[in-house]
Amino acid sequence: LSEHLPKNVKLIRGWSGHPYSMVQELDDSFDALLMVGYHSMAGQSGNPLAHTMSSSKLDSVFINGQQSSEFFLHGNIAAKHGVPVVFVSGDAGLCEEVQEVSPNTTTHATMVGVGDSTISIQPEESRQAIREKVKSALCGDLKKCVWDQPDSFSLQVRFIKQQFAHRASHYSGAQLKDAKTVIYTATDYDDIMRFMLFTV
């Protein structure tokens, strides 16, 4: 499918090990961020694939008291650089989260999760809807989709096993809250993503 992309597009494959993870090249030169094919956060029922960064290690992630999905983790990177999060597609549960967190962001629900099953709309219908919604979103007021950044970040990560939490608690500045939960605070969001990179 890559040959169908516009000629000025750069395609990233694989994982570089950069703290920005899924948005590794994002900086303030970007006009907008679009997230396609995302899923519900760990602990939610919106998708059989529901997890946050690692289904084998993490039970939940909270940032400033907000339970966090991969959408929220990476959306905060965009916020740091003043880049608007203009479009998100994924399961219906995720789209509900997006509307709560970023009500001006356009969403498209491609499927609903029920137990270990998914109920999806027809693929071509979904692709067409995404094309139309993205075009409309990019023609709108992008500034309305820029998130405010708080002065500091409080990260709480609950691991599946106490052994994972014990190991992560040795990251500089981290503390054990209980046997499976580690807390970490920072004023720079990059430090939050570095913590996630080296402990998850």
Image (cartoon, helix red, strand yellow):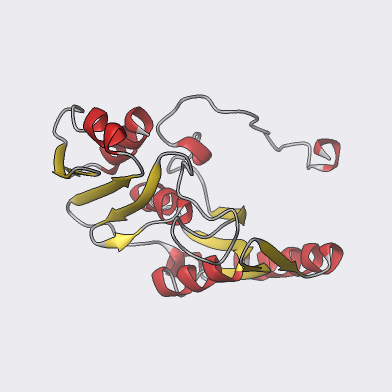
Closer to the camera in the image, 95 or 79: 95
Q: Is residue 8 left or right of residue 18?
A: right
Residue 95 placed where, x, y %?
A: 55, 69
Q: Residue 123: which quarter of the image?
A: bottom right
Residue 192 placed where, x, y %?
A: 28, 40
Q: Residue at x 50, y 34 (%)?
A: 25
Decide: is 99 above or below 4.
below
Q: Residue at x 45, y 49 (%)?
A: 52
> How many numbered discs, if any?
0
Q: Which quadrant would the C terminus be assigned to in this image?
A: top left
Decide: is 49 above or below 118.
above
Q: Is residue 20 left or right of residue 50?
A: left
Q: Residue at x 83, y 69 (%)?
A: 125
Closer to the camera in the image, 10 or 183: 183
Q: Is residue 189 left or right of residue 139?
A: left
Residue 188 placed where, x, y %?
A: 23, 41
Residue 70 placed where, x, y %?
A: 46, 51
Q: Which quadrant would the N terminus be assigned to in this image?
A: top right
Q: Residue 114: which quarter of the image?
A: bottom right
Closer to the camera in the image, 133 or 166: 166
Closer to the camera in the image, 141 or 154: 154
Decide: is 159 above or below 121.
above
Q: Is residue 108 left or right of residue 93?
A: right
